[in-house]
Structure formats: C-alpha cells, structure tokens
Image (cartoon, rainbow, N blue to C red):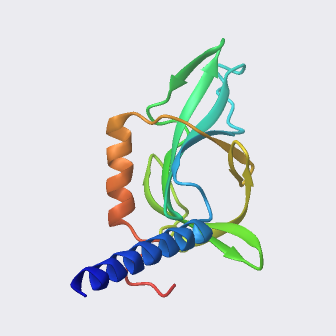
Amino acid sequence: MKKILVLIVLFCAGVCRQSLAKNDVRERIASNGNYVGLQKETYVDPEEPDAKWFHENTLLVRNNEAILDEVPVVVNHGKKGYSPSDGGFFTYRARFTKRDGQIFVALRLCQSDYLVFPVDKHDQYTEIKSYPVRLTSDGIEFNGVKYAPAKVNKLALKRLLRLLSSESLEKPGTNP
C-alpha cells in the first residue's frame, strides 16, 4: 500500500511540474537572453564631421524583466571607439508585458552619467515610457532599434544582473 501511495505522489508531482513548465513557457513574452543593438544618434562632432555616433545598447532579459544599458560609441574611418562622455550613458529598468495581443516594453531610467536635465522638467527617474515590441526570429525590436542575441562580457553581465535584482520598474516612493 505504501509503495502505491509513493508512486501516486511521484506521478502527481511529475504531472504538476510538467504543467508548471508549460505555463512558464506560455507566460514568457520575450526570450531570456542577452541582446545588443545600435541606436543611431544625430550628434555631429565639428572636429570629426564624418564620424557616426551611436548608443551601443545591451539588453538583458530574464523572465520578462530587463535592463537596457546604453553606451555611446563612435565609428570613425571604419573603427569603433568608446566615448568616455560624449552622448551620455543611460541605464533603464524594463518589463515586457502583453495587452490585447500586442507586446510592450516599459522603461524607467534608473542610472545615468554625463547627462543634463532641464531644471523645470519633471523627475526623469520616475517617468515610465512604453514602446510596442516586435519579436523576430533573430531578436527583439522596439523604439527603432533591432536587438540581436549577443555575448556580454562577464563583468558587464554581473553588473547588469545585480542591477536587475536590485532595481524595480516603479521607483520607490512613487505610484505606479
């Protein structure tokens, strides 16, 4: 009798685990992973007018939660360089959701460097912006940027994962 009871419990546990795994797959909106995309900027350096400016965006997605890290880069004479301050550094906390069959990503600025905000404007760190998302066979696209799966160096990955676990989409002390 005990063996039959143990078998029933094990069978039920297996069925429940399989059912939960199927639900997890159904609920996942954006595939977990690390993605990189280039966001073209309009900046023109008077000393290097042929140089092209971008933000190299790293998108880290885990269970529909994400971090978007934007780093300024310049391409000049076919060589990519990282700018220590030109263009500003932006880091956003993000979340993917689905409404009426459409996928959206909500972004809130959580860190920045080398940026100046107007004095009379609202707090940039509480504003949540939402963009429609297009999932493609080779990545994610929103706000005019195509993100493709990519490797992220271990140090950057560790920093982004720590930020993902410590920052919420809604800034503490604000109403979502």
On screen, residue 17 versus residue 70, left or right, reads left
On screen, residue 172 versus residue 76, left or right, reads left
Residue 162 found in image quarter: bottom left
Q: Can residue 83 be seen here? A: yes
Q: Image point 56% across, 31% down: which residue?
A: 73
Q: Is residue 78 above or below residue 55?
A: above
Q: Image point 44% across, 84% down: which residue?
A: 174
Report x, y in % for residue 83. 49, 30
Q: Image point 48% across, 34% down: which residue?
A: 151
Viewer-side residue, 122 vs 101: 101
- The residue at the far front in this view is 1
Classify the position of the N terminus by image quarter.
bottom left
Q: Is residue 33 above or below residue 105?
A: above
- The residue at the far left in this view is 2
Q: Image point 36% across, 82% down: which residue?
A: 8
On screen, residue 72 versus residue 112, left or right, reads right
Report x, y in % for residue 44. 69, 31
Total of numbered circles in the picture?
0
Report x, y in % for residue 126. 49, 74
Q: Can residue 170 be seen here? A: no
